[in-house]
Image (spheres, rainbow, N blue to C red):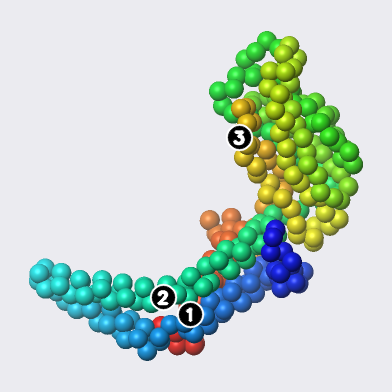
């Protein structure tokens, strides 16, 4: 990642902490910075006045349900005040938008999955596109892994395609690799000459927290995607009670970040009197 040189010194120490604690601290830091920037770059006196006006107008509308004409007039004023409030909020939003996207990119490459670790088995699965009737031909169809230096393919470099999938079971030494695959038909080996590649990183330990995106979509004629079996990190996996709550138990870094950032943002706004 382009910004690793800047972000690694800032956030890498957090990767040494328990996963959930690191997410909480990152959410805390980012939420605090966003609220401080918002307060700095908005006229808080005007924002408070607009917010109070919006609240008053909303209260009036509740009492005007039997007077549609007057309610429409109040509703129009409320929409105008809401628009002013939103427009004055745009400046701090624009200031923080790109930095937040960069930070999210870093988090997605360090905190979404566990890394592949040297000398531990992992799978690479090639999914073929539906409608590519490789299983209906009379000849054998298979995928060949073409470069295997410093890698061990435990189930063989040639794998038959079954149910539109070919699976390789592998392990290797720590390092960065580009895996190369080629589809072969025993009666017509040059039918689809394209090579398909997938970059992977193998680390020395699970604590290294670096990997390539496990799923890679392909634009070739026959391959739909290549998937590496990095295990997804579940933020609440070891948290009592929460780990059994539907939806929440499936949250990774993004879902848990959203939960904690909402809590921290609301708390900071109230504590710092930000409107």
Q: Residues within 10 Å of mark 1 (few under 14, many from 20)?
A: many
**Quadrant housing residue 103:** bottom right
Residue 89 disc label: 2
Residue at 20% in and 71% down? 76
> Looking at the image, do the residues carrying marks 2 and 1 touch, with CB atoms under 8 Å apart?
yes
The residue that label 1 is drawn on is 38
Check disc 3 and report the residue beneath it.
219
Alpha carbons under labels 2 and 1: distance apart = 8 Å
Mark 2 residue crowding within 10 angstroms, few (<14) / some (14–19) / many (20+):
some
Figure quadrant of residue 61: bottom left
Left or right: where 55 falls relative to 75 = right
Q: Residue at x 64, y 19 (%)?
A: 134
Between the residue at mark 1 and the residue at mark 3, the CA separation in whole angstroms equals 42 Å
| Residue sitting at x 55%, y 23% | 131
Seen from the viewer's position, the closer of residues 84 and 104 is 84
Name the residue nearer the viewer: 55 or 235: 55
35 or 120: which is nearer to us? 35
Image coordinates of residue 64 in percent, x first then y, are: 14, 74
Total marks shown come to 3
**Where residue 64 is drawn, which disc sits there?**
none
Question: Earlier along the polypeptide chain: callout 2 or callout 1?
Answer: 1
Figure check: 174 above or below 195: below
Q: Secondary structure at mark 1?
A: helix
Task: Compare residues 117 and 187 and report the one nearer the observer.
Answer: 187
């Amino acid at each position: 990642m382009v910004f690793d040189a800047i972000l690694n010194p800032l956030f890498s120490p957090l990767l040494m902490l328990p996963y959930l604690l690191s997410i909480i601290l990152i959410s805390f830091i980012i939420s605090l910075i966003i609220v401080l920037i918002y307060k700095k770059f908005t006229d808080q006196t005007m924002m408070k006045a607009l917010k109070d006006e919006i609240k008053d107008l909303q209260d009036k509308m509740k009492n005007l349900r039997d007077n549609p004409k007057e309610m429409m007039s109040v509703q129009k004023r409320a929409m105008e005040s809401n628009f002013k409030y939103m427009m004055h909020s745009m400046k701090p939003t624009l200031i923080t938008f790109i930095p937040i996207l960069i930070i999210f990119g870093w988090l997605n490459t360090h905190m979404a999955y566990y890394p592949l670790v040297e000398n531990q088995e992992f799978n690479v699965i090639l999914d073929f596109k539906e409608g590519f009737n490789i299983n209906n031909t009379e000849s054998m169809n298979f995928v060949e892994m073409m470069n295997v230096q410093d890698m061990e393919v435990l189930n063989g470099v040639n794998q038959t395609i079954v149910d539109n999938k070919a699976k390789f079971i592998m392990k290797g030494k720590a390092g960065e690799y580009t895996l190369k695959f080629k589809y072969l038909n025993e009666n017509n080996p040059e039918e689809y000459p394209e090579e398909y590649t997938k970059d992977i990183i193998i680390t020395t330990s699970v604590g290294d927290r670096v990997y390539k995106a496990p799923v890679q979509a392909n634009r070739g004629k026959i391959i739909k995607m290549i998937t590496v079996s990095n295990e997804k990190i579940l933020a609440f996996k070891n948290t009592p009670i929460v780990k059994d709550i539907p939806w929440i138990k499936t949250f990774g870094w993004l879902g848990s970040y959203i939960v904690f950032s909402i809590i921290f943002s609301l708390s900071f706004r109230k504590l710092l009197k930000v409107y």
